Image (cartoon, grey):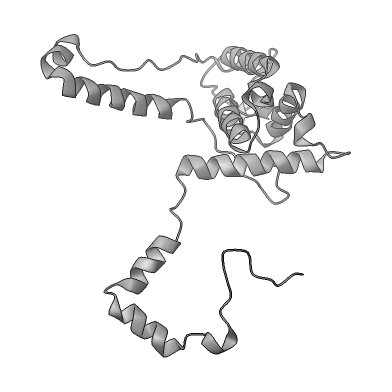
Amino acid sequence: MDSTAPEGDPVSPEGDAPSPSSGAAAAAAVPGGTADARAQASPAPLSRYEAQKRRDWNTFLQYLRNQRPPLALAGCGGAQVIEFLRYLDQFGKTKVHAPGCAFFGRPTPPAPCPCPLRQAWGSLDALIGRLRAAYEESGGKPEANPFAARAVRFYLREIRESQAKARGVRYEKKKRKRAPTSAVRDAGDASSSAATAAGATSGGSGSDAGEGSFTAQPGGSSIS
């Protein structure tokens, strides 16, 4: 392996290496120098959303590598994304009643039944949103994003409708809250700008909260 230092990061000659005492003196000369340097060197912690998005992305890449033969991300399309979602069903925790079940369409069944556990629609919808963003952040072109394929949208719609019937629940999109007209009119331009910024912030966090959290298990391609 080439031990040459990268360009722009020269290595000091052995005879010119600073002594530990001189380094300590330089740090002491600047009030809080050591603490400031450490604070600047340590990266900012990831948000919960960013950390989850990274785990989801690594899980999907591991899933592609585990296929026989392994699948390349460049050759991945909507069909492969749907197969991935079906694969995740084995790790689901949501009871989805079959049409022949006595509890079909009942939101609170009084007794257990042998119907399978599946991934909840809300979890899958949130997962696809994170993977769609991760794909483009990794250099993928929006027009080639497999997570935005029409087939994936249709599949999620079918899951939403079938689970709504089986579980006896209704999935409705949350409407954004708007400030009263009189309050906006009396507040003036400054309050109007603040309300716009607040609306954008609250609107950005609603669609990404799923019913479940996907994390890579030992083996790299499962969820919890």
Q: Is residue 61 visible?
A: yes
Quarter of the rendering occupied by the N terminus: bottom right
Q: Position of residue 192 (x, y in %)?
A: 21, 20
Outermost residue to the top = 181
Which quadrant of the structure image shows residue 151? top right
Residue occupying the point 66% across, 13% down:
154
Residue occupying the point 23% across, 16% down:
179
State whether residue 165 is above or below residue 204.
Answer: above
Residue occupying the point 55% across, 22% down:
109
Outermost residue to the right = 69
Horizontal side, residue 27 vs residue 124: left or right: left
Q: Position of residue 172 (x, y in %)?
A: 46, 14
Quarter of the rendering occupied by the C terminus: top right
State whether residue 145 is above or below residue 50.
Answer: above
In the image, 152 versus 91, the foreground residue is: 152
Counting labels gives 0
State whether residue 18 is above or below residue 153.
Answer: below
Q: Is residue 224 visible?
A: no
Q: Position of residue 168 (x, y in %)?
A: 54, 14
In the image, 128 versus 8, the foreground residue is: 8
Horizontal side, residue 175 vs residue 105: left or right: left
